[in-house]
Image (cartoon, rainbow, N blue to C red):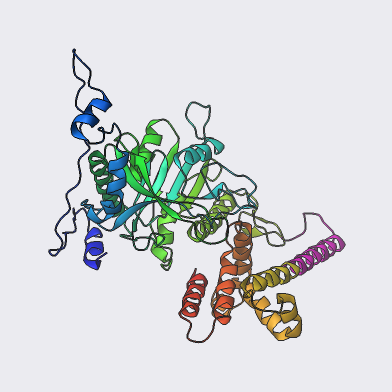
């Protein structure tokens, strides 16, 4: 696929069609064979009559043969402004990205979850199907026709065009790299304009093939490898094709109490202040006790988890501003953002000292528990990163190198030099880091943002010198650290 075409698609509101190569004669699209009406009256011609007179096969009543002949050339001869030559529509499916140990599984909504702690009405999910979307909104009690429904604000971070066909999401992909995202814009209005044009391309192409469209379906693999991508004919009409905006407006018109915002960002892009500001502008106007926040990306992994962490911190501040207790209290309880003194009015000095000792003991026990957990998780991560050909287990390596164990433990806890330097510039920096770590650990059902840094760093360390994949692991570790 030429870079010029991709650049053209990124323009705002322009209709782009990639011209055919001057050296290649355009192929004509075959037309469905028309079926003549039956003869009225007289002798009805039979198949045997036709075969005897012409020696040819009888006229087919279906399009199977036509579709089989066309399948090899459909992608090469596409002429849409977005769904053009060399592009395919692939099912939005991630066979290896689904968490299997969630507390609640919702059909059609992979990786739907909420933080384990806090009760802040914050949720995350992968790109759902239509029935999964309805199920989530029903679980969150914002369906039409019920008394006192709650309110839901839905955030999408998808940076690539999406269309829904019969309730299932499809994404635009380059046929040569069908598993690689096509990022065309970081502006929601541009993406929605592209999706509208892609919808028109779909309807026009389906009309040429008798109401069906060639899509590509990614199936799950029995092993951990990638599944096959199968060309599949899908029924299409003006009623079952919807853009993201079409879908959400349809839900709103049906009476679902939900608002939709699209804040696109590519998976490999650094998360900057303007991205967080876009979230904050919406969240600050919501009631934390009456409005649920749902965040979604392709797999519902890194971008969704980051947004859940950020939203949890904002929601925590909102609750404490109302005089409610800190949902992520670190040690002594706080009310309205102020640290309690640990003694009640009229308490004696002995009682105050006893309370202080109890709190200190609880903090020490919590620290020991965190240490034990970090060692277990560290051993697990190291074992996962070790190649299968390595004869040593992670436990053997750690026992043989105590200094390595301590270094990796600090890395697991996020105590990197740049982080420590930053904490020194902040008021109550160490306490703030402990708070963020606690929120990260409460939202790690799919991915742990802090562990991601160490995992990629370990994978880089285990690659050989000059291995291109090693540089990729290192870059991913740096981007994870920036998050």
Please state the horizontal and vertical placement of residue 316, each as a whole percent of the image. Answer: 58, 54
Provide the residue span drawn in magenta. Answer: 341-370
Name the residue nearer the viewer: 73 or 413: 73
* Residue ID at (47%, 79%): 471
Q: Is residue 314 left or right of residue 445?
A: left
**Residue farthest left in this picture:** 22
Name the residue nearer the viewer: 122 or 206: 206
Q: Is residue 207 left or right of residue 377?
A: left
Q: Quadrant of residue 383?
A: bottom right
Q: Is residue 453 above or below residue 297?
A: below
User: Which secondary structure is most common in the magenta stretch?
Assistant: helix
Please state the horizontal and vertical placement of residue 128, each as a whole percent of the image. Answer: 47, 45
Q: Is residue 276 above or below residue 211?
A: below
Q: Quadrant of the N terminus?
A: bottom left
Please state the horizontal and vertical placement of residue 391, each as a whole percent of the image. Answer: 70, 79
* Residue ID at (24%, 48%): 197
């Amino acid at each position: 696929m030429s870079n010029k075409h991709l650049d053209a698609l990124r323009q705002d509101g322009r209709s782009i069609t990639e011209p055919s190569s001057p050296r290649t004669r355009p192929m004509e699209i075959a037309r469905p064979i028309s079926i003549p009406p039956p003869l009225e009256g007289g002798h009805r011609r039979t198949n045997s009559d036709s075969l005897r007179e012409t020696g040819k096969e009888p006229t087919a009543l279906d399009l199977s043969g036509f579709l089989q002949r066309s399948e090899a050339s459909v992608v090469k001869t596409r002429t849409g402004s977005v769904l053009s030559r060399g592009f395919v529509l692939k099912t939005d499916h991630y066979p290896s990205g689904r968490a299997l140990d969630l507390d609640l599984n919702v059909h059609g909504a992979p990786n739907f979850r909420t933080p384990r702690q806090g009760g802040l009405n914050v949720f995350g999910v992968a790109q759902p199907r239509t029935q999964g979307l309805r199920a989530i909104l029903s679980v969150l009690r914002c369906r039409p026709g019920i008394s006192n429904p709650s309110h839901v604000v839905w955030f999408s971070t998808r940076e690539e065009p999406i269309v829904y066909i019969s309730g299932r999401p499809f994404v635009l992909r380059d046929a040569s790299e069908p598993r690689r995202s096509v990022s065309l814009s970081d502006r929601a209005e541009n993406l929605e304009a592209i999706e509208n044009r892609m919808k028109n391309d779909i309807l026009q192409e389906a009309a040429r093939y008798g109401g069906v469209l060639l899509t590509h379906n990614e199936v799950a693999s029995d092993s951990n490898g990638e599944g096959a991508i199968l060309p599949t004919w899908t029924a299409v009409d003006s009623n079952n094709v919807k853009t993201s905006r079409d879908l959400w407006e349809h839900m709103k018109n049906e009476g679902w109490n939900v608002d939709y915002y699209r804040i696109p960002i590519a998976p490999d892009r650094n998360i900057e202040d303007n991205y967080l500001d876009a979230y904050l502008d919406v969240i600050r106007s919501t009631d934390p006790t009456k409005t649920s926040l749902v965040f979604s990306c392709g797999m519902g992994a890194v971008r969704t988890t980051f947004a859940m962490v950020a939203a949890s911190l904002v929601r925590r501040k909102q609750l404490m501003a109302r005089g409610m207790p800190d949902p992520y209290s670190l040690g002594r309880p706080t009310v309205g953002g102020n640290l309690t003194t640990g003694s009640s009015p009229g308490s004696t000095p002995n009682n105050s000292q006893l309370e202080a000792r109890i709190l200190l003991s609880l903090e020490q026990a919590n620290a020991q528990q965190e240490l034990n957990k970090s060692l277990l998780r560290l051993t697990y991560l190291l074992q996962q990163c070790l190649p299968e050909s390595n004869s040593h287990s992670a436990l053997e390596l750690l026992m043989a190198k105590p200094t390595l164990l301590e270094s990796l433990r600090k890395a697991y806890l996020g105590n990197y030099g740049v982080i420590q330097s930053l904490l020194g510039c902040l008021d109550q920096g160490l306490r703030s880091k402990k708070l963020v770590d606690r929120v990260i650990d409460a939202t790690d059902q799919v991915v742990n943002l802090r562990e991601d840094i160490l995992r990629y760093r370990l994978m880089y360390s285990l690659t050989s010198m000059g291995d291109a994949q090693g540089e990729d692991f290192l870059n991913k570790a740096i981007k994870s650290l920036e998050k």
